[in-house]
Amino acid sequence: MADATVGALLSALQAPMPAAQPPSSPPAAARKVTPGAGRDLPERRQYRFRLEDVAFD
């Protein structure tokens, strides 16, 4: 059984590789995405609080 398996593997390795096929369609163009309202503004860290800072005051 091992000889049959080794023989099958060797014959598979020696078989010619199939030719690579070119891509069927060109890649899609990149989308032009505009950011949502306020997404381009700088972040406002001074207005962000952690729950631990305000929950037990």
Image: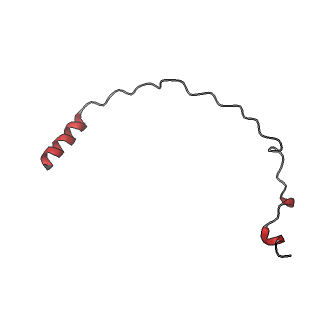
Residue occupying image coordinates x 47% and y 26%: 23
Taking 23 as reference, is 20 left or right? left
Place of residue 56 in the rendered image (x, y in percent of width and height, measured from the top left):
82, 76
Place of residue 27 in the rendered image (x, y in percent of width and height, measured from the top left):
56, 28
Place of residue 18 in the rendered image (x, y in percent of width and height, measured from the top left):
32, 28
Place of residue 3 in the rendered image (x, y in percent of width and height, measured from the top left):
13, 47
Q: Looking at the rendering, which quadrant does residue 54 occupy?
A: bottom right
Quadrant location, the C terminus:
bottom right
> Compared to 13, does 51 lie above or below?
below
Taking 41 as reference, is 33 left or right? left
Residue occupying image coordinates x 24% and y 32%: 15
Q: Looking at the rendering, which quadrant does residue 9 occupy?
A: top left
> Compared to 53, does 10 lie above or below?
above
> Compared to 22, does 50 lie above or below?
below
Q: Residue furthest bottom?
A: 56
Nearest the camera: 8 or 17?
Answer: 8
Question: Which color mode does the image show?
Answer: secondary structure
